[in-house]
């Protein structure tokens, strides 16, 4: 019974969050997995990385989705101590994708409420 109450409480709290943004951090990181060597080890920019960046941009069409993707990117950036900040900030442009913010460890994702494509 306690477990059922806990699950119900989690659903009530997480429900509004998950209904607004369809993108998960797993989806974001899966699309950007090919970029890790480029961002952390100064490797070449693989085609698969840009494919993932483009796919992610195409999936994140709504403001909640874009904000969620941004939060996932910030979280991922903070999880890599060897992240090349300049390469991370320039990744969308290097892949021909335009987003209205720089990917960094300190990006305020709530600031980007109205996002144009």
Image: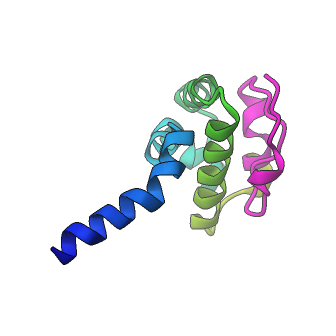
Residue 74 painted magenta = no
Q: How many marks?
A: 0
Give, as a single range, the part of the protein colored magenta.
Answer: 88-117
Answer above or below: position of 35 versus 117. Answer: below
- Which SS does the magenta portion mostly show? loop
Residue lying at 44% horizontally and 46% vertically, measured from the top left: 26
Q: How is the image coloured?
A: rainbow
Measured as percent of width and height from the top left, residue 69 is found at 61, 43
Q: Can residue 32 be seen at all in this image of the molecule?
A: yes
Residue found at x 37% / y 57%: 11
Where 19 falls versus 86 (above or below)? above
- Residue 41 appears in the picture as rendered: no
- Quarter occupied by residue 85: bottom right
Q: Is residue 113 magenta?
A: yes
Kindly indicate the quadrant of the structure image that contains residue 75.
bottom right
Screen quadrant of the C terminus: top right
Residue 77 appears at what percent x and percent y? 64, 59
Residue drawn at x 74%, y 26% is 97
Q: Residue furthest left?
A: 1
Q: Camera-side residue: 84 or 1? A: 1
Viewer-side residue, 109 vs 41: 109
């Amino acid at each position: 019974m306690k477990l059922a109450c806990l699950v119900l409480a989690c659903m009530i709290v997480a429900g509004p969050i998950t209904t607004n943004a369809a993108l998960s951090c797993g989806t974001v990181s899966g699309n950007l997995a090919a970029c890790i060597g480029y961002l952390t080890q100064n490797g070449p920019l693989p085609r698969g990385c840009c494919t993932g960046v483009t796919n992610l941009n195409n999936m994140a069409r709504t403001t909640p989705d874009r904000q969620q993707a941004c939060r996932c990117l910030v979280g991922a950036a903070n999880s890599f101590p060897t992240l090349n900040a300049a390469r991370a900030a320039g990744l969308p442009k290097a892949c021909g994708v335009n987003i209205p913010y720089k990917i960094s460890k300190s990006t305020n994702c709530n600031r980007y409420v109205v996002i144009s494509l």
